[in-house]
Amino acid sequence: MKANRKTGLVFFPAFDWAISKTHPEREERLLYTQDQVFEEGILDIEGLVEFNPSLATEKDVERVHFCVPKVDAVLTESHYISAGGCKTVADAVLGGEVDCGFALVRPPGHHAMRVVHGARGFCNINIEAIMVEHIRQTYGVDRVAIVDTDCHHGDGTQNIYWHDPDTLFISLHQDGRTLYPGSGFTSEMGGPNALGTTVNIPLPPETSKEGFLYVMDRVVLPILDEFKPELVINSAGQDNHYSDPITGMRFCAQGYAKLTEKLQPHIAVLEGGYSIEGALPYVNVGIILALAGIDYSWVREPDYDPEELRQSDEIRSTISSTCERLLEERQQCASKRKKYLEGDEFVQRSKTIIYDTDKILEEQKEMIRVCGGCAGVLKIDSYADTGRHLLGISVPRKACSTCQDIGRQWFEEGSIRRFDLVCLQDRVADAYEVKRK
Amino acid sequence: MIVGLDVGGTHTDVVVLQGKEIVCKVKILTDHENLLDTVCFGIFEATRDFKPQSIKRLVVSTTLATNAIVQGKTEPVGILVASGPGINPNGFAIGEHYYPVSGAIDHRGKEIASINEEEILEIGKKLESSNVRNLALVSKFSVRNPSLELKMRHLLADNFDTVTLGHEVSGQLNFVRRIATAYLNAAVAGISRNFYEAVRGCMEHQSMQTPLEILKADGGTMTQESSTRYAVETILSGPAASVMGILAFADRTKEEVVLDIGGTTTDIAILVEGVPLLKPLGIRIGGYNTLVRALRTVSIGVGGDSWVRIEDNILKVGPERKGPALAYGGTEPTPTDALVTLGLVKGGDRQRAAQGMQRLAEQMGEGVEEAAETVISKTCDLILEAVQALVDRVNQMPVYTIHDLLEGRVIAPTGMVVIGGPAKELAPHLQDRSGWPVQVPPDYEVANAIGAAVARTTCQVTVLADTDRRYVYAPEEGHMDIIDWRARTEDVVKIAFRLLRQKALRLGADEDDLEMELLEDYEFNIVEGFYTVGRNIRVKAQVKPGLIRPYREAAV
């Protein structure tokens, strides 16, 4: 047996790490997946290569996040390994050692936003974003698409790339009115400088294979074609599965494999998925085989019954009208962008962010410069009920000189009498500066 | 007195040891067409001057199973494979009588689909009418629950000579390797049984009462009686014999590299505190990955008779061999010729060797002696590069816990033990180029036979407990029992050591040689909803490869 696409695998179940003893994110989450992967003999297949994860560095994290009060305070070793595992796969793919790769790592990351006061949705740092920025820094890749197929809205990844026109973020997820984190509606399409590079497709509970694959064909693949990314990343959460204990969808291993085959991601990264016995072993095998271009038609759950999982007409029409509405709303992005450019130089928004895992509440004021020449300099004033107050300034990777100057000025003006810490994330210089009380 | 016999590609070596002293060495040519005669003659030649009653142990390492597999001279096997969901089992077809059948076990050992009795019986009839006498019965996850394999055996066993069950060949997870291993075991089971019975017959003919023991690929031994059930474990025991022979001279406090430099190839192994490293899953043979426990040896195409030439202005050594060295009547220069030219090896035709070096020297623009030195250096460098690559691979083995990733042991050898034809002559060069002390043990030319003689019985058990489902199961032993719901790792470890001890004694181990160790122990909670309902405990233990008692002490 031979892989048609050479596939790199970082498989790191972290058998000695858990959020808590009975938390879904616990030691044996990938135990049965490992059993299935080992038993299927997948690691013996020619063209499948297993790597040990490397460790991400503080610098990798600071390229993406403002960690409050500092990186080491909000991360454990497991997070450095999880993000490092993604980097390892990325290096293997970008270095040409393999054609594609899968980082089967934990803990996950797609709920981690730019500012990190603690863990939310089981995530501390955004492992995909850390990987993508590592790739950009090391290999000079520019346009990247991240397709998030976790059942929960990838609000962290959305937040990080909200203002980045070079990163297309597409999330398919269970309707935010019925599930954590309660966001990800079609109207969320990106900031003033990046309208249309955020795409949200909320799906009704009980969406099954048919619905997911319909969305792939109708929305995801056409938008990808239009965006022409150099690299496609899949945040491969597996909690859309019909047996998942904390969600309400009806997706299956065959469906995930088919979706992977359609998407052909360069790199897949495991996100959520907590049906550790009934779903993960089969879904992961399905995804690995589909990535490697090996026949996956025999992969199915022992209790799989396509009849029982059949989608109702009502769900079918809800999905189709969501897709049409989304495509229509996207038509207006260009005219909205024009209005922004004619309007105020700076645009503000405020929001409240909850950290359900660590029980923290954060109030955020964000200001972006509407810029015709780059992604715009960003300023974040963040206050959490831990008592910590941050001023974070982010100068984007390809910032124009005006945005760079403004960023520097904001940083210098930021007073450590008012803030506990003032940080400048300068992506042009790939530097991170901090002033502390 | 104990006797060790190792069948090699060219020669068969036999030694007789009295205490730590070699009282007889015999080297005879191997007749691959008639291995039985070679083995029996070797035993006879080596022991003829001693009283049969004084022989207390006799271990043989043969190429019987290896040759049968590599040359395709095995017996036909009917193999029934119950895969259930996963990778398409038609991709794993092996042999001419391969039958995927219904039935499935899941990763927790639940039977999720039963077998179809009529289907099995039907296949049984077909196999009988094709005159297939050996069966291999394999299901996915049979190392979690053997029920499907046992049911198939129940339906078919009576009508076949040998039956190999997947869960008995290894406790490791890997369905594809389990299929190959069970198949190969069945394919050589009959051949092995006949062969070793015949050897035993020869011994009896000489009035030797001692049991016959056979060396396995993991450097351990088993009794002749066990060799049918575990026939496949005797493949590729040759490199293991050499490593075990060297073990007696290794430093038990260090990490060392072991080299067996032959004519065509050099075998490399690593010893950690006097214990050879094992392959992670199993050895590869005849194009198949298996679950056969084996020493982690690497073979590279560099040896005393490797073809030396200049290609594109670059000096090349091996991997081909074009016959013997010039000094011994060959046609192409070799590293041995370099040694002969420099007078490091006495014997052979020094003039012919020097002529060969002269040819190389002209192309390299060097003097003859200089060229010979370069050839030797190059040979040593190739070997040392392969050593480094093996060490790197060992250190990059996948790990699955944060602890192992951050604090896992890193192997860093600090010495070398070298045997084989040009060992003594190459040793100083290897020492110079590696910076490690290099040792050449005495009697190194029969180290393989010594290894066979002094290797202890080894074995491994895997024990799984699922306290939610209240069972404990040791696949290789076919042991299934009820376990208390409160059981913890230490309880399962106790069971593992008990079973390991029983198994080792059954395979012929001496009470004194049961150096048992834990290879792996994991304990996981089984959580349903938000409650812990039980524990999933996994333990692996082994009697590690090593020497029988008197020689273990000699080793320090």
Image: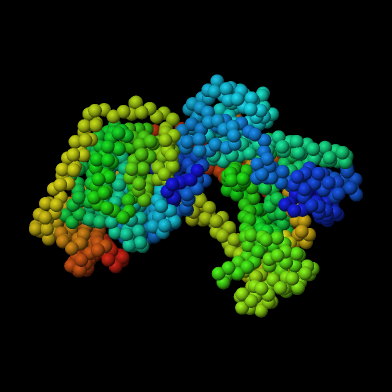
Give B404 or B298, whichever is nearer the viewer: B298
Q: Position of residue A124 (x, y in %)?
A: 34, 51
Q: Residue at x 21, y 32 (%)?
A: A317
Quadrant occupied by the C terminus of chain A: bottom left
Q: Residue at x 75, y 49 (%)?
A: B7
* Residue A62 falls left or right of residue B361: left
Q: Residue at x 10, y 54 (%)?
A: A339
Do we see residue B59 in this rendering?
no
Image quadrant where residue B203 sits: top right
| Residue B491 sits above or below residue B361 on the image | above
Q: Position of residue B144 (x, y in %)?
A: 54, 34
| Residue B312 sits above or below residue B268 on the image | below
Image quadrant where residue B163 sits: top right
* Residue A124 falls left or right of residue B89: left
Q: How many marks?
A: 0
Residue sticking out furthest to the front = B331
Image quadrant where residue B298 sits: bottom right
Colour pattern of the rendering = rainbow
* Residue B241 falls left or right of residue A267: right
Give B16 or B62, whichever is nearer the viewer: B62
Q: Position of residue B515 (x, y in %)?
A: 69, 46
Residue sticking out furthest to the top = B118
Do we see residue A231 in this rendering?
yes
Q: Residue at x 52, y 55 (%)?
A: B396
Q: Position of residue A193 (x, y in %)?
A: 18, 56
| Residue B2 sits above or below residue B267 on the image | above
